[in-house]
Amino acid sequence: MTERKKLTTCLALLLGLHALVAFAGFFAPYDPAAQDRMAPYLPPMRVHVIDGRGRWHLRPFAYQLEAHSGSPDGYHEKVPEAVPVKFFVKGAGYRAFGFISARTHLLGTDRTALHLLGTDAFGRDLFSRILFGGQISLLAGLLGTGITLFLGLSLGAAAGYYGGWRDEALMRVAELFLALPWLYLLFGLRAFLPLSVRPAQAFLLVVCVIGALGWARPARLVRGIVLSAKERDFVRAARGFGASNAYLLWRHVLPETSSVLLTQAAILVPQFVLAEMTLSFLGLGVPEPVPSWGNLLSSLQQYSVLVSYWWMYLPAVAMVPFFLGYLRLASLLQSDAANPKIEAAGGA
Amino acid sequence: MTEAKAHFWRSGAPGGAVVALVALSMLAATARVREQKGREELLTVRGEIGRPGGRIVLSLRGEPKTLNPLIAADAVSREVIGAMQADLVHIERGTQLTEPALAKSWKVSADGLQYTLTLRSGIKFSDGQPMDADDVLFTWRVYLDENVHATQRDLLIVGGKPIAVRKVGAQTLIFELAKPYGVGERLFDSLDILPRHLLEKPYLDGKLSQWGTLATPPTEWAGLGPFRVKEYVAGQRLVLERNPYYWKADAQGTRLPYLDEIVFLFVPSADAQVLRFQSGETDIISRLGAENFSVLSRQPRGYTLADAGPGLEYNFLFFNLNELGEKGFAETKRKQKWFSDGKFRLAVSAAVDRDAIVRLVYQGRGAALWGPVTPGNPRWVNRQIAQAPRSLDRARQLLREAGFQWTSGADGEAALADSEGNRVEFSIVTSSSNADRAKMAALIQDDLKQLGMKVQVVPLELRSLIDRVTRTKEYDACVLGIASGDADPNSDLNVWLSSGGMHLWNPGQEHPATLWEAEIDGLMQEQLTATTAARRKTRYDRVQEILAEHQPMIFLASPDILVGAKNSIGNFHPAVLEPYVLWNAEQLYVRAGTENTRR
């Protein structure tokens, strides 16, 4: 496979994963906040195609789970109660992209609920929560990366291009930011905020903080490239022809940084998703009942959950394909960026 | 015995109510005074005969703040102090009845104003110094001294006057009250008698509060309890050793306690306690959460777990009903129009799914509550209080009556608004370190969403939560719990009196803000000085009725007392009163033949 093709495959895979999360309302069978108080800590339901007598069924089905008598969290399959899995069923209302009202879900059942990945302490469907939680976590990662790269690019370019005291000042500030213990800073920040923060406010805050604190590293990278780019012959030539600073930056210098920025983006997204998860895990992110991957995992802080309900680890597994995708993308982008230069050098 | 026993039963509970508790505490360690031949009058206790020697290890959630009973306020300190100190008359935790302790007998005058106590003779402190009436006089002086700020002081002031004490003979004391005291001789419980020979000098120097800390050398601290300090290692453990001068003996005449040592390990969290117990490092565990209880009961290895039934802890939701001054939170002030409406609170109460709280938070190991008195306190609970099942229809009806209306909210769901069109929206603060209450708040949030209320749950660190509730009053609503120390209504006096510091919805009022709060004040004062238990009960029943009528606190649920102990521990009888497992520390013992396997 050529490098190009690998890159396309990787991008397609990532797009698919993101679509799954973006259209969570459609793929998730239930509302992520809906509680089923009779079914806390329900284990994942197995989807069968072969029934107890060895007969194959075209339509997959699950068995209804029934609580052991006298046990608060033990369940077994009620074998005669087969629940056929239906596709494109009408269910709880949701908003695709936040504005299109819809009711159709990919999966569902007529009777008892289908909990593919089990339920949490409140009987909420974990599969739905993982998908909806991804919206928060991934969006925080993407927006945070956007803010960081914007800040990194503008400050790095300014420092590298104008040099002198501006460069000194900006780079010292960047070093300060690199040295900041950002987690403790966040704890401090949260204490200053009003008591009750709406989920949307909390989300924006998290994104802004993550984005604003990460700019130092990309800024240093951009500065390095700008420093060397502004001394290149074609830039000097353009300056000689009377090009303005803005034109030079925009037309000749900044394009040089594109490959570095793309690679940085692919590295930063998973890093920032992880940052959001850390904050939510510690209770500083979006508040309940809004799910995010971090606060889905926060129940694992309790020993009893840790040793009793293995499916509560699944949100951690859910992020693995995303992270692998992004890191693969980063390495492909890097070699992609490196290759043409080597060819060009070899050809010269 | 005769005299003591007569009073013991007469002043005790009306029989039937305590039967269930007697069953719980398998041995009814009914005390019997045995006149010994020697000078020393030991108290003989009934119960399984144990084996002297051995030690048990327990874990504590954090270090005790102090060993000084005058200033100890936290549960951890009280648990340790309980094993080191003794009182004149003691409430037996299993039966919840009084029994003779340092006083071998007592007599109450006909008007209920005079208590004559006779001390046991020949008693010694844990450092070998004798105890006599002068120690009691000294203790009384210290407890009543305003400068000492003793936590017990308020309980010793009856009818506005402190209880006076005078000595008649070396072993006899007369306590005089300004008014009859409803609790009777129960007032002497938990008033630990302090060693005058050690504390008089620091007291006169005004340094008493610095005494009896963990830094005080064991030789300079003594008590009358079954154990005394042996060693303290900061951040790790506190070791108590057997008090050789303890004044109780078993039926065979063996001097108690049986154990040589009790070791308290300091651990940071409830989960750490569970891990230590599971690995066999500790012998006894108490204050277990329901989830950890079911983890431990899955594969019990050499230990037994016990569900002692609902304790005295009651959890509740309350709204900010404080009179907020000019500088008060404008936002909260606006919301108080809803909170102060009794119908609004009743509607919230009707919408709360208490059964779900018991099932999801306590895994069924608890009881739903409609009042502050739990089923664990059968003597005082008012069974006439209606236990209305959850009803959203009734909640909506009440809200409609109170002038609320539903509008179509932005998200397409019905949103509740008041008569002026303001959306009903508030936050509930809860302690971030208490997973149970955070869960309750999350369930209430979902319950109220179905009424169209928008609720945010805000977990806060406990200290800043208490600060907001009692001092700055910057909150809308709060989920908290109170674990009463004793089953008697007096232990919650400062919760129900409008002037009380724990009158959480509006603490420390100068004058009762509402008529019903004034009525509760009156009833609580009346029961304080009522002479018979039946009269006290009618007053307290009425208090419970008023609370149910106005719901300043929306009572939610009470957890069972869940404990566990290794099978090798004998005489292990958990009680629903604090300290749940160490109340009979002097009778606990390690069974023969188990010592080696334990280590």
Image: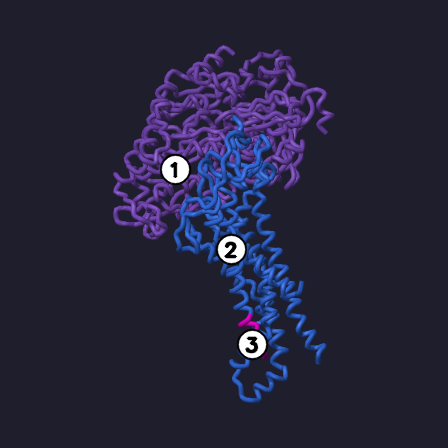
Chain colours: A blue, B purple
In the rendered structure, the answer to whether residue B424 lies left or right of residue A200 reads left
Q: Amino acid at mark 1?
A: His
In the rendered structure, the answer to whether residue B191 lies left or right of residue B412 reads right
Residue to which mark 1 is pinned: B503
Q: Residues within 10 Å of mark 3 (few under 14, many from 20)?
A: some
| Distance in Å between CA atoms under marks 2 and 1 | 53 Å
Q: Which residues are magenta?
A: A153-164
Residue under the point 64% across and 64% down = A332
Between label 1 and label 3, give the one nearer the viewer: 3
Residue to which mark 3 is pinned: A166
Q: Position of residue B277 (x, y in %)?
A: 63, 32
Q: Position of residue B567 (x, y in %)?
A: 64, 23
User: Does residue B464 appear in this view?
Assistant: no
Chain ID of residue with mark 2 = A
Which disc is residue A19 wearing? 2
Between label 2 and label 3, give the one nearer the viewer: 2
Q: Earlier in the sequence, mark 2 or mark 3?
A: 2
Q: Residues within 10 Å of mark 2 (few under 14, many from 20)?
A: few
Chain ID of residue with mark 3 = A
